[in-house]
Structures are given as C-alpha cells and as structure tokens.
Amino acid sequence: MSQPRQQANRLAQGGRIDRSRRLSFSFNGQTYQGHAGDTLASALLANGVDIVNRSFKYSRARGIVAAGAEEPNALVQLGDGEAAQVPNVRATQQALYDGLSARSTNGWPNVQRDLMGLVGKLSGSFMPPGFYYKTFMAPASMWLTYEKYIRKSAGLGRSPMEGDPDIYDHLHQHCDVLVVGAGPAGLAAALAAARSGARVIVADEQEEMGGSLLDSRELLDDRPADQWVAETLEALSAMDNVTLLSRTTANGYHDHHFVTLHERRTEHLADTAPRKEGRRQVRSRLHRVRAGRVVLATGAHERPLVYAGNDVPGNLLAGAVSTYIRRYGVVPGQRLVLSTSNDHAYRAALDWVEAGREVVAIADARANPDGELVAEARVKGIRVITGSAVVEAKGDSRVNAARIAPIDIAGFRVVGTAETLACDTIASSGGYSPVIHLASHTGCRPTWRDDRLGFVPNTVPGVAAAGGAQAVYATAEVLDDGVAAGRQAAVEAGFEAVSVSPPQVPARRDGEACALYQVPHEKTTLRAPKQFVDLQNDVTAAGIEVATREGFESIEHVKRYTAMGFGTDQGKLGNINGMAIAARCLGRSIPEVGTTVFRPNYTPVTFGSIVGRHCGELFDPERYTAMHQWHVEQGAAFEDVGQWKRPWYFPRQVDGKTESMDEAVARECLAVREKVGILDASTLGKIDIQGPDAREFLGRVYTNKWAKLAPGRVRYGLMCKDDGMVFDDGTTSCLGDNHFLMTTSTGGAATVMEWLEIWHQTEWPELDVYFNSVTDHWATMTVTGPEARKLMEEVTTDIDLDRDSFKFMDWREGKVAGVPARVFRISFTGELAYEINVQANYALPVWETLFAHGNKYGLTPYGTETMHVLRAEKGFIIAGQDTDGSVTPEDLGMYWAIGYDKPFSWIGKRALTRPDSARAGRKQLVGLKPRDSQVVLEEGAPIVLDPNHAIPMPMEGHVTSSYYSPTLASGFALAVVKGGQQKMGESVYLPMADGQVHEAEIVSTIFLDPKGERQHV
Amino acid sequence: MSNLAVETVRTFDTRTEANTPVESPLAYSYRRSGAPAPGADSRVVLRERPFMGHLVLRGGAIVLDDAVREVLGVSLPGEPQGLTLDAEGQRSIQWISPDEWLVIVPGGEEFELEKRLRAALGDAHFAISNIGGGQTLIELEGEAAHELLMKSVVYDVHPSHFPVGKGVTTLFAKTSVVLRRPSESRWELIVRRSFADYTYRWLLDAGEEYAIGVER
C-alpha cells in the first residue's frame, strides 16, 4: 500500500464531520484518510477519487452521483477478511470507520483500466436492449457457462465464502404511530403524535436524523436548521412513549401495517461487530413492527437530467453537491456547471460559490426564471443561461467540459448553437420524485400530479404521506404537513389531538419548475452519444426508444426488456425519467404510461438480519424426551420425527469398531425377538378424553367400534379423513366409562388433536366431551420380547402380571420402580410387550432402574429403525409411510377394523361407497418377498407385471416399506399393488434405475407369527 | 379389571412420596448448556420453578367458578386473558380459552385439589387433566426482561398492553408458550417439557446482550 493521500477536496471548515478524528481506510487497495462523520462516499470525494466502479453492461467508468439511497454507481464490496465480505454496499450509506476496507464491485480486473472497457466502447450497437435474452438464452444448456462470465463482468459483488461470524436478531415492535423518515416532516409528525400520548417509533435510514435539514440553507425560528433538529430529537428521546431508531431503513411495507425495519447497529463501527463489555453484539436487527398508523415521511429523490455523457464521473445530482459541501465539508470539484429545470437546485451553485470554487454557468431550461434563489445567484455574479441545458458532457474518466445549447422542450429539439464550457463537474436537477416505494408495497398505484411533476402515493387507510413524500417541498409547508399527519395518525389511533406549533420558516418565493426529463441533442436519440436513464442497469434513452419500437408498450414490458429499475436500484434515480421517455416515444402522457411496481426491499437487506437468531442450533426447535440425555450418552444416532429427536439406532463398539446401522439394527431386532428390548415411545401423541359422550365420540372419529370397550381394556383404532382415506392410527384405552386415553402417531399428534376439536366444535357440539393433550406429561417406555415379563416382575410389586389376569390389550396401574405407572399390554413388535407410562419427571430414574435389572435378560435399547423392521414383519402399517392420503382401510385389507354397521355414521364411511373407493383394481397393501432373499427392495420402487413391456410400462404399484429381516434372514417389503389382495403368490417385477430388474412374490403382509401367538404369551 | 375399581373417570396420583429422584424439564439443559450465575451486571434473571402442580380445567365458567371459589378460595379470572392469584401468590388460575383454564399450585397439592374439585363439581360436565409432568414454569425478572420478550414473542408486551394480571398463549420463536405477568417485575413462561430445552437455549442466546443469569 502507498502513503495516504491528501484530502484535496476537503474544506477547511464547515460540515458536520469531526476534523479532530482522522480515520484511515482503503479503497481498491489504496489507503486514504477521512473524518468521523464521513460516509465512504464523502471521504472518497474528499480524496478526489473519481472512478468508483465500472458499469454493469458497457463497463464505463462511473463516479459518485448521489448522496443517499438513490446512488446507482458507488456499490462496493465491503469487508477485510473473507468472512466479513458484504456485497453491494452503497458508499453513500456506509459510515466511515477506522480501518474500513472496500473494493469496487465491478471492474475486473480493476476499475482504472478495465478489460471490459473495450467491449463497452464498441458495444453501442453490439449490446442492444434485450441483448441477454437474444444472445445467451440459446442453447439453454450453455446458459450456466455464459452466466458465470456475465456475472463476473457485470460485477454485482460476491458472497463471502466463509461462515458469518456475526449474530443478528429480531425485535417484535408494536406502536400506535410509526413514522418513517426523520427529516422535517417526520420529526414534526413524531412530535405531534408523541405529545398526544401515542406510542411512536421513528425510523430513519441515515447516520444522523434530520434529513434535508442537515444541509439546509434555511433558518428555523431564526436559527440554523440543525439546531431545531437537535432540540426536537432531545425532546423526543426524553419521552417514554417514543423509540428513535437511526441507521434504520424501513425496507418493506407488508399487510396490515406490518413494516420491517432493518437497523444496522454496528456497521458504522467495523465490518464485524465488535464486542461490548465482553459480550457479543448483534450486527443488525430486524424490527418487525405492527403499527396502528403509519406516517411516510420518506422525502423525495432528486431526478437527474438525461443528457449525452451524463454518466461520466463528475456528473452529480445538484442536491448531492449541496449535501457534500454543507454536511461533509467536501467540494467534489473545481469548476461547476449546473443544469436545472427548477429553482431549488440553485442551492448547489450558491453553496459551491460560498465554498470558494468557481461556478462556470447555470443552464436553466426555463425562459424566464425569476425566483429568489435565481436572483441571489445573479447577485453573486453567476452567469445564468436561460432556455438552455447541458446537452452533452465531455470527458472519459472525468468531465472536462459541458456543451450547453438552447432547447425547445415541447418540440424536443436543440434550437441554437451549442457553447462548450470547460468544467470538471456538472450538477443537474430535473425536479423531485417523492419516495413512494413503501406506499407502493401496499399495492396501491400512485397518482401523477402535473402541478408537482411527480407521482404521489394514493391513500391507503391508516397510511399518510407527509412532506416531500407527498410532493410538498417548501420547508414551512413540509413542517405543517408533518404536524398535521402526526396529529391525524394519533387521533385515528384513539388519542386526543394536541396542538404543536412548528418553527417559523421565512417563506421563499420559488419560480415555477418546468417539465424536463430527457434533454434533446443535436442528433436523434438513437444516434446521439449515450444518454443514461438507469445508471446501475446501464439503460439508455435509446434503449427505451428501441424497446418501444420493438412493440414493448406497457411500462412493465419496457422495464423487463431493458432492465430499468431492476435489482438493488429499484428505480430510485431513473424510473420517472424512463417513464417520461417511454411516454414521449409512445406519444402518451406520463400518467397514461404509469409506473412499474416497486417491491420490497427498498434497499438490500443482509440474509443475517432476515434469519435473525433462527439459525445454527436454534434453526428449528428440537423436541426431547425425558430420556434424551441417556440416549445421547449411549451414542444413539438420532432421527428427526416431526420436531422430535428420536433414537434411530444404538450403534455399539464391537472389536474396536462402531457398528454400521445395518449391524446395529440386526442386533436390536434379534434382541427383541429372542430376549427383551426397550424403546422410548414418549413421542407418541397422547390425548386425555373425558365426558359422558366420550365413547360415542370415539365411535364417530374411528372406523371401528368402541361401544363395548370395558375399563381396563385397550383397542387399536383407525382414523379416516372425511374422504375415506386413512390418516392416523393408534390405540385408545378405556380408563373409566367416561374416560379414555387416545394415542396417535408421533407426527400426527397435533393434527389429530385439532381434528377432534374441529369435529366437536363445528359438527357435534352437543356431545359432552373434552380433549386435553397429555403427550408431554407421560413418558413411555416399551419393554418387549420373550423376557419382558421376567423383567417386569422385578420392577413391580403391585401389578399382577399373570398372563390370564393381565392379558394382551389390557392395561393396569401400579408402581414400576416405585413410581406410579400405567402399564399397557399393547404390542407394535408382535412380541410380549408392556408399555410403561410414568409422569415424565420420574422417567429417567425409572428407565435406569429397568436397565439395572434388565442386563441379565439382555435388555437392549432399540431405535425407530428396529421398530420399523419389527412392525413391518408383522404387517403393522405406519400411517404416512404405508399410506399416503389415497389409501382406504379396505385397501389396507383391514376389514376387521371397519364398523360397517355402527348406528351413527363415522367420518369417512360414506366416502367408502363412492364408485372410485369401491372400484376393483385399486392399489391394495400386500407383502413382497424378493426371489433373491438378499435383495432389499428400494422404498418407492415402481412395480410392473411384465418387465419386457415396451416403455412406458404400466405401473401396477410401488413399494412403501422395505427392510432386511434378520429373523427371516431375508429382505421383505410392504407394497401397494393394483388388485393385490387377489394376486397372492404371483410374481411382480421392479425395474431399477441401474438396469437391474428384481423379481418378487406377492405374499401376505404378515411375515412372522401369522396367528399372533407371540404377543399373547 | 383385577386391581381397579370401576369409575366413570379414572383419577391417578402420578406423584410418589417414595425417595425417587426427579428430573425437571430443564435438568438436561443445565447439564448441556450450563447455567450462567447471575452477576452484578445481569439485567435479567431466569429461574425455573419446577415440579409445580398443573391442572387443566375444562367446562363452563359459571359452574367452574363456583367450584374453584369453594375449593381454592379464588374465583376464575373475570375476563379472557385474565390471571388470578391467591392471597399468598402461590396458587393461580389463568384463562386459556373460552372453556379452558390452567390452575397451577404448589407441587403435591394437585391430586388432592383435583379430587376436591371433582367432588364439588358433581354431575356437571367438565374435565380435569393433570399435566404437571408435561410443562414447567420459567420466571424472568429484571429490567431487560421486557426487551428479551420482545425478541422472543410476537405478542405486544408493552406495559400498557400487558398489565399485571394478564396471560396469553403466544408464539415464542418457533414454538408456543403461555406468557403471563403475575407482578410488576416478574414474567412467567409456561413451556411444554419437550420444547423446554429449545426455549432455554433461545433465552440464553437472546439474553446474552443483557448478561442473563440463571438462578438455580
């Protein structure tokens, strides 16, 4: 790095920067100095950096144009280390800090001497609008190749390749009145609303609140405007009901006055958030505001004039020139030419002269400008050339002259000889465009006001625009407008109006502005040097004219064809000019052409702040059972079931090696079939059902019968949706005549609970029954296998475990390991099984006691994978795996669970008689036994009857569950096959993607113990 | 039914006096994530109050109100989102939905309370479910509690909108909690057991800025 350069353009005094605090920063590898209070843009201008980027399409040299969010060129890649990289930061919005490091987003290999520059020079006719669509979209397969290079040369910044070291969060905010923007209108509105007692949030995107008052020439109550700003902010911050958020951009206006504010909390300090008092700080915070009323005091963006060469570095907005001089003490050049259509822009020339630099001339498009500012300029001896405009800027890497010519606006032509004036800076103003982006987000289209030469937002209930956002520009009127909007918002939110008197501002007489957008050139638009409309997307006036000639008449089509207003720009600077040009080409008025739609976000938002703290370990809730720590300590592999973490299998160390999943599952399966296993089944949904009509209700929501289930007994139940399709199953136990405990699948718990409530509340409110979720209250451990009874005998003294008194599908209560428990003899494995339920706070000690006694019986913990294998061997379905919302109980062959003759119809019954539900040839659940016993079929594999059939083969079904069974020493599967129940013993074929074809036999779904003797022992 | 007396509703005392260890829903979280001790700079303190008795009451307000006044000596909250506490502040009843209330009492009282309420309610249509093992109560106290909640819940917790004596069920990060304000300085979260660890880790993370401490 070379030595820091002098700040040649920095004034000796003035501005709001702190000259006592020098900050060092680097841009494109060069070290510079600036001051506290600078933006990166003001510091670059102070150091005389002209070229900050290369343009998107033509790779032209570009400089700083604006001083705020509307800046199209000065996009930088910020950050020192790889992890801290942030793309597309606007230098005009980035506060300077010591050590800041930035590079141009475009300019490969560098901005000064650009490889692509040659292409840009030649590409006038080479890259017409629609170029990308026309050139690169075919062949489609090549797009990815093109795209990589287009991106690199287009230069839209790059994402970091390392993880973000910073943290982010969200804050849910609620207020009566949200004020967006803290310029004169916003501050006045906030004061009026807050004084009435309303909860007020004020958000402003800049480093400092005050907006246009921070660089105003006007006096408020006879004092500099920034004094009133300071006093007002002090008054507001002293009020409990006011929240002031600076460095906070309102980026999206969503439904029901839900507004997202993006607060940058540390980006003015460093590229990654520094620690504060030893603790991490959030880098940025998304405020999710639910506002009662919203005041949009978003101000206006100045419109540049569109003239030839208007993108050469040194072309600036007139207002930006004033801002740099008055707020940052920076004069961005030596010799200024101003081209304007209005009085307000004269400020730039006056400020320039007061800074001690030369104003070469003011080209005023109006024939007889006569406002006070015009008079002041003339008094100061500035040459004012009326009826004229800058028609062309000369220069390559910096403006070196302006050609000024008399123009006929109505006739769109140059009407006299141009005069060439040497200068290095051209400021232009074509008037002001209210910032209507947020209002647009609400979906309302703006209205064109001919008297104000701008679009103003249409009214949406609860939203008011004030000041510049409403095309009200005179400071006194802006303040009044703000007070009125703030007061009205508070009143609408239910507060009493309080009178607030805004400060006195001497009235200034401004002459009327004229409507000038594109400045005519001696040559036609298509032949003249490029006249840029949207600098960020390299859209020219000629491009828009070509688009309209090619038949793109809707402004939305013009936008898409030319890319005007795309991307991070969102049409801030050039949109209105573009519409005016389209209107001229089409022979229509601006309101007839209309606007495009502005979309959130107003300025780019980091992904971090969208995500907040919903990332990493907090990305999604993980639900744990009471035994979770035990599972972790045993080295369980976990499976996500809904949000639950369930042990999937428990791999052991065997001979110094960790078992594979297949090995662990095989061992766990055999342990259950031969000895005893234990499963943590706490995740199953459990619903406590009470009431005299509980039994009747069960009969209506389940397909099977419940009238005769006695207390102490348990029954399996199947549930259908009203379309007759199975959606959940489980067991329900009769605890008392009016009291049942329903279990659901793990994933279906909440859905079933809602299902019961919906049917009770909307269809059968006359049934006296209540449902309460007790899923988390009980922890459930399934002890299953031939040795299960022996183990149970050791841990309970008061439950009679005799096979004849505590039978299969009974439940009993008593103590297990000294803890009150309900024990259910239900089995999902087909083996002797006891499901122990204890209050969850006791679960871990009970579980550990079972192991203390169980080791001698070979007690083996098993996970969900083993559970799946064991249940599939028995043909037990899993709703959602073997069913998919298109399977009826009949398709499953579960006729035994269908109460065709129940007195009251049940949910889904009627649907079973629909012609489609009753037709032959529906897919039915069957078992599949691969001919090769070592083959494990793929779940989801399609089933065909004739593997030699020409493609496309008729599909007869698919595999729903498939495993290897160590007990059967064979692969086996469940599948749905058309008419499968009538095809027992037949062969089917499963052609695989790799060309193999597996053959399998259709068999019963029950592979093991078809009579069910093992669970009854 | 070998060892059961037939009842219309089967009540069951799930607690034991035996010397069996218990684990609060946050026990695992303390071991896994730690519990930073409150310090002088802690602007918010988290405190679990585990093992309380939690009962859900379902039924008509008028019938239930008579019973709880008779048995507990407090009335049901007079309006939706209401929370009432007994004189000692140890027993509370919270409105949950139009026919649902949450009763929280010192641990061990709930089974006796359920029996007495059932006796008082007689033949009325109601339901009482013991859910004490399924949730826990987390207190937040301190000047930053309010802002910590703003980071976590969608509901408006501004004092003007959430006065003492209010309680709601609301979204908390990506789960839900029952949130209530029994006193000026104290907020209570009632969290489902299986979501307790997620809630705890969230609060520690979001509370780092305020030097959150955990009292145990």
Image: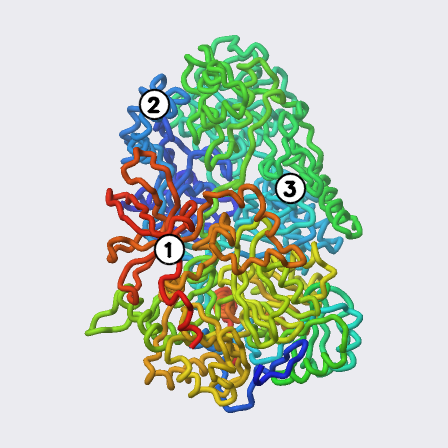
| Mark 2 residue type | Thr
Residue at the spot of label 2: A135
Q: Reply above or below: A931 against A326.
A: below
Judge by depth and name the residue closer to the eye, A864 or A219: A864
Say whether disc 3 or disc 1 marks the residue closer to the N-terminus: 3
Q: Residues within 10 Å of mark 1 (few under 14, many from 20)?
A: many
- Label for residue A627? none
Q: Reply above or below: A48 against A810.
A: above
Judge by depth and name the residue closer to the eye, A232 or B176: B176
Say whether disc 1 or disc 2 marks the residue closer to the N-terminus: 2
Determine the CA span between mark 1 and mark 2.
Answer: 56 Å
Residue at the spot of label 1: A927
Which is in the foreground here, disc 1 or disc 2?
A: 1
Q: Is residue A383 visible?
A: no
Residue at the spot of label 3: A296
Determine the CA span between mark 3 and mark 2.
Answer: 43 Å
